[in-house]
Image: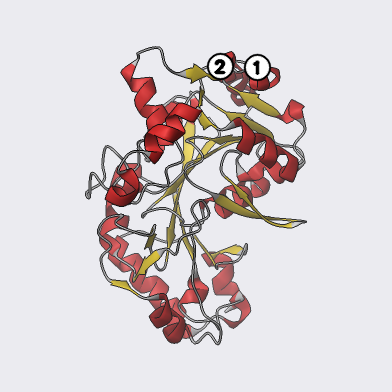
């Protein structure tokens, strides 16, 4: 079946939002699914400029795509409605599963009063508390079907998805965070998120079968990051100032998290976490982002430096797989095959 799953191969912020939007458009997807909660932001460039989505899939800005928030979603209605406004998303283009969970004030307070922020660098969005409440099964969870503000959008999504798949229409599942943060498989547990962040986990949250998937896209970045604070080990960590100098940039290169606005930690490429992500997810394609961080001359593929081509091949040797697409910190993305033609 025509289902594409977008997965992060490191510790998040690999550029999954850009990649999900790119392939939704390129493959003519009719449906885009966003799983997880508002504890991660995905950026896409619209006609109005950059938009950070914490709830909607980045394909929400494409007028012919239906957006689905499945049972494995954790929702803040206020954030969702603001994103609908920013994306100019028609109400008829949004479906929410009745079993999706609404993040309550109690969930937010529980995380605010916990030690998660200082202990593991949590964004304190209430997502983890909502996941915990769901698992505890004590009846203190608010489901989407019980929220009056969401009722116009609520219907079982799996029958709808099955109808689309039976018509051979492409569906994009936009995963959140990165493999290195999986609560099941992270080598650095408890420095993890509250959910599984593998392709299999995302497919389950979406209400689909593994047999539906024919395409898994693993997104990685040339310089992996972790969120600010005590967020866990980050091999080969160095400073943004060092990165800026080595890239040849005349202006500072620095990143802040899209949710908490804190400065991210950054490191040199580590093949080990990517090899693990490949082993667990078995991707059909790999996208490598942020190549302009290697050398600011790499702002367009027409003037790609030979050193960058060499480094790309070195990365491939280290991870044991070919890289199919490459991109920058901007919204630009191109296949390596086309890149070779331009060189």
The image shows a total of numbered marks equal to 2
Q: Nearer the viewer, residue 5 or 342?
A: 5
Query: Mark 2: which secondary structure?
Result: loop
The residue drawn where x is 45% and y is 27% is: 106
Tell whether 158 sits left or right of 50. Answer: left
Q: Nearer the viewer, residue 174 or 284?
A: 174
Mark toward the start of the polypeptide (1 vs 2)? 2
Q: Residues within 10 Å of mark 1 (few under 14, many from 20)?
A: few
Tell whether 112 sits left or right of 94. Answer: left
The residue drawn where x is 53% and y is 84% is: 249
Q: Which residue is tagged 1?
A: 148
- Residue 140 in the image: above or below residue 225: above
Expressed as whole percent of the image width and height from the top left, the position of residue 316 reads 36, 66
Mark number displayed over residue 98: 2
Mark number displayed over residue 294: none
Residue 31 seen in this snapshot:
no
Q: Nearer the viewer, residue 313 or 147?
A: 147
Expressed as whole percent of the image width and height from the top left, the position of residue 253 reads 50, 76
């Amino acid at each position: 079946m025509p289902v594409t799953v977008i997965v992060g191969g490191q510790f998040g912020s690999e550029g999954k939002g850009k990649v999900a939007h790119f392939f939704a458009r390129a493959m003519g997807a009719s449906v885009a699914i966003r799983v997880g909660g508002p504890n991660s932001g995905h950026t896409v460039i619209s006609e109005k400029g950059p938009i950070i989505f914490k709830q909607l899939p980045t394909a929400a800005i494409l007028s012919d795509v239906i957006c689905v928030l499945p049972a494995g979603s954790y929702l803040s209605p206020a954030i969702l409605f603001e994103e609908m406004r920013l994306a100019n998303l028609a109400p008829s283009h949004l479906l929410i599963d009745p079993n999706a969970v609404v993040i309550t004030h109690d969930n937010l307070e529980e995380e605010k009063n916990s030690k998660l922020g200082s202990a593991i660098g949590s964004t304190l969005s209430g997502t983890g508390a909502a996941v915990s409440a769901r698992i505890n099964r004590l009846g203190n969870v608010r489901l989407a079907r019980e929220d009056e503000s969401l009722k116009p959008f609520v219907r079982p999504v799996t029958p709808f998805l099955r109808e689309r798949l039976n018509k051979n229409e492409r569906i994009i599942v936009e995963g959140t965070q990165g493999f290195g943060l999986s609560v099941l498989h992270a080598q650095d547990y408890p420095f993890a998120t509250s959910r599984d962040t593998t392709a299999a986990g995302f497919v389950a949250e979406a209400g689909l079968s593994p047999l539906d998937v024919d395409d898994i896209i693993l997104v990685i970045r040339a310089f992996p990051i972790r969120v600010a604070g005590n967020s866990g080990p980050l091999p080969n960590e160095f400073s943004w100032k060092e990165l800026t100098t080595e890239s040849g940039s005349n202006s500072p290169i620095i990143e802040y998290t899209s949710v908490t606005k804190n400065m991210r930690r950054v490191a040199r490429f580590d093949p080990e976490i990517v090899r693990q992500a490949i082993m667990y997810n078995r991707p059909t394609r790999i996208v490598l982002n942020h190549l302009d961080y290697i050398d600011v001359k790499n702002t367009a593929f027409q003037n790609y430096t030979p050193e960058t081509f060499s480094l790309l091949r070195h990365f491939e040797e280290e991870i044991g797989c070919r890289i199919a697409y490459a991109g920058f910190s901007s919204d630009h993305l191109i296949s390596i095959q086309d890149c070779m033609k331009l060189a």
